[in-house]
Amino acid sequence: MQKRVTFAGVLLPALLLAPQLLITLVFFIWPASQAVRQSVLRQDPFGLRTSFIWLDNFARVLSDPGYLNSLRVTVVFSIAVTLLGITTALLLAMMADRVIKGATAYKTVLIWPYAVAPAIAGVLWLFMFNPSIGIIAYLLRGVGIGWNHQLNGTQAMILVVIAAAWKQISYNFLFFLAGLQAIPRSLIEAAAIDCAGPWRRFRTIIFPLLSPTTFFLVVVNVVYAFFETFGIIHAVTQGGPARATEILVYKVFRDGFIGLDLGGSAAQSVILMLIVILLTVVQFRYIERRVQYG
């Protein structure tokens, strides 16, 4: 029988909920409401007067070829970061789960990158891929690949995807490792006795049992790619070259803080928020059906 906590009055539960509600109000509800308000306004060139223009900012944004390009770039970027980050973390977690000697040191080293700030992670990879002094760019030239992400949009996208995925691998690794260690060894040993190979054991036993963890990480990584990679983009490419890496969150910054189009920038932020909410709902409504919880 499961015990349930009951309260004699409403004062104590209200006090317990107050800090979280206050944080949500100050850091989400209030900024989101201000963005919605700003998205239906237009300021004069001197910022002295605003006028209510209904949905004109949204119509202008959605008809802008530059915004549609940023939307396409964001889709490619988020899919690439999610796939690379999750598959690499799963591979490393599988390897770490089998390590016996020096396992603690191995796991500690794999966790360290998560403590690195996004901008610093971007700068680290920027130095390694620098066309003039970067070690990776030098090795690529040695095999006949001319690397210059400052001129090549595809190479710039590859660079920011690698930097963003590397920053998130440690987070994914922690959850996958915890999921692997929660799988009963008797199941894997029984499959091995039945002559099931490593790939078949992974496909039929391990991965289905990891599906709740994988689903959670897909949601988290998509949100991460949409929002938390701003520092990487800003430090590495600043949306270039020719806006080849200008994701939606960076376009909001460019139009709002550089172009000083506050109404258009607010409309973009509202659209971005709606896109992420829609993606999350779709993931929980349809993809979660394929998740096996035991």
Image (tube, rainbow, N blue to C red):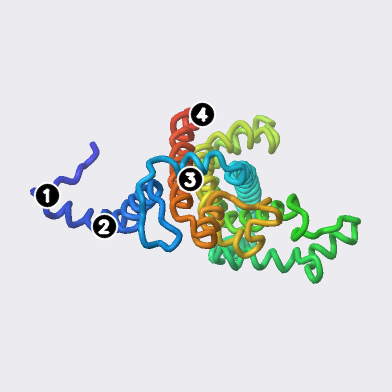
Which residue in the protein does label 2 denote? 22
On screen, residue 200 versus residue 184, left or right, reads right
Q: Is residue 286 above or below residue 106?
A: above
**The residue under label 4 is which amino acid type?**
Arg
Q: Nearer the viewer, residue 15 or 8?
A: 15
Q: Nearer the viewer, residue 60 or 83?
A: 60
**The residue under label 1 is which amino acid type?**
Val
**Which image quadrant: the N terminus?**
top left
Q: Mark 2 or 3 closer to N-term?
A: 2
Disc nearest the viewer among 1 and 4: 1
Q: Mark 1 or 3 closer to N-term?
A: 1
- Local crowd size for mark 3, using a 10 Å CA cut-off: few (<14), some (14–19), many (≥20): some
Which residue in the protein does label 1 denote? 10
On screen, residue 238 versus residue 51, left or right, reads right
Which residue in the protein does label 4 denote? 290
Disc nearest the viewer among 1 and 3: 3
Query: Residue 106: image x %, image y %?
Result: 62, 62
Q: Mark 1 or 4 closer to N-term?
A: 1
**The residue under label 3 is which amino acid type?**
Leu
Q: Mark 4 or 3 closer to N-term?
A: 3
Q: Is residue 153 above or below residue 193?
A: below
Q: For marks 1 and 2, give the CA distance.
A: 17 Å
Q: For marks 2 and 4, give the CA distance.
A: 36 Å
Which residue in the protein does label 3 denote? 272
Query: Residue 68: image x %, image y %?
Result: 59, 41
Residue depicted at 71% across the width and 56% down the height = 241
Q: For marks 1 and 3, give the CA distance.
A: 37 Å
- Local crowd size for mark 1, using a 10 Å CA cut-off: few (<14), some (14–19), many (≥20): few
